[in-house]
Image (cartoon, rainbow, N blue to C red):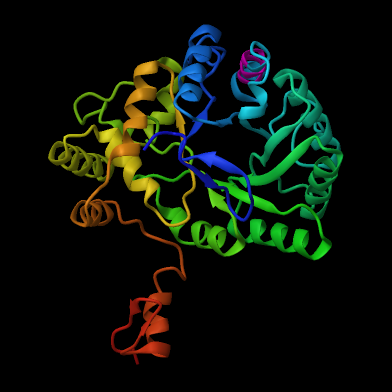
Amino acid sequence: MPLDHYVTLGRSGLKISRFGLGAMTFGTEWGFGSDAGEASTILDAYVDLGGNFVDTANIYTKGSSETIIGDWLAAEPGRRDRIVLATKFGGNMLPGNPNGGGTSRRAIHAACNASLTRLRTDHIDLYWQHWDDPFTPIEETMAALDDLVRAGKVRYIGFSDTPAWKVAEAQTIARFRGWAPLIALQVEYSLLERTVEGELAPMAQAMGLGITPWSPLRAGMLSGKYSRDNHQADSPGRAASLARNFNERNFAVVDMVKAVAAEQGASPASVALAWLLARPGVAAPIIGARTMAQLEANLAALDLRLDPSAIARLDAVSKPALNFPAEFLPMAVANSYSGMSVNGQAFGPSVR
């Protein structure tokens, strides 16, 4: 399946490729990543294959990611109209200034204008709240985002890394007030991070939000590049973020991914991404690529179809422990529908 087989994002008419191109590693200011030339080559290749969904943030590589994308867009007339351009607000670009970040009206408008300048465009297609701000009323955030949509600076809005109850509150307020609704949710989601299946993923489906997982390969862990005996970070800047991955449970999951990959004649990364593409509610995982080889390896997942047995084995080895009441409810609901099947779901004997 090439990248020009599109899906609509959430409850909207916005069409995106099944893989978004994440630009967090565009720029070398964090001690790793692609320089402007290599980033442009990756963008060219992604678009040539039909890709149209590019995702970044104001703070990625201290603003260089947006600048690189903006220069790439400006280099070819007409390129901007083919791209669904997403960026995020919330990160503080003005250290020491309490109003330089967060989700207040002042911060949102300032961040949007600065991103538009770096991206060299007059509008952002999808504007994400990067994370929840505990110090700003959600009504203020949603009103400010509606202002930007009405002004034409932003086309659609979404939330990233925000508790399910807060996203549901924001969406309900927007619907009640007639404001621009959320259409998407970006969260960490992979075979090594499935706890979103407790509240966030079901909430997104109920609220009409397309899910765009970040870190679908858990910083390369699911590509099989690390082992129990060799798990050194490939660059000093990534060592701290990778350390959380190196435990026996995760290596057991990676072992199963490798086994399925060997059976399928595919790479471990393709298997992990194909599994994620098949999860309920997932619209487009955000794949990162610092090199062309990584991009090509990841896109191979579009042509891979895992059989039910392989999916069942991957599900079992990666099964997460979910917060209450996620694991309690299936047992409790059996008391309502014992011995029956509803929407294809069969219920066993009631628990008394």
Quarter-of-image position of residue 215: top left
Residue 252: where, in percent of width, then height?
Answer: 21, 44
Quarter of the C terminus within the rendering: bottom left
| Up/down of 321 relative to 348, above or below | above
Q: Which of 325 and 181 is in front in this view?
A: 181
Indicate yes or no whether the magenta region holds residue 209: no
Indicate yes or no whether the magenta region holds residue 70: yes
Q: Is residue 246 visible?
A: no
**Main SS category, magenta section:** helix
Quarter-of-image position of residue 329: bottom left
Q: Is residue 245 visible?
A: yes
Q: Which of 206 and 327 is in front in this view?
A: 206
Quarter-of-image position of residue 330: bottom left
Residue 96: where, in percent of width, then height?
Answer: 77, 25
Quarter of the N terminus within the rendering: top left
Is 278 left or right of 106, judged from the image as shown? left
| Up/down of 259 relative to 341, above or below | above
Q: Which residue is drawn at 39% across and 46% down?
A: 277
Q: Which residue is drawn at 47% across and 71% down?
A: 325
Find the magenta span and give its range.
65-72
Residue 278: where, in percent of width, then height?
Answer: 37, 51
Is 273 left or right of 40, judged from the image as shown? left
Q: Which residue is drawn at 48% across and 43% down?
A: 188
| Up/down of 256 relative to 76, above or below | below
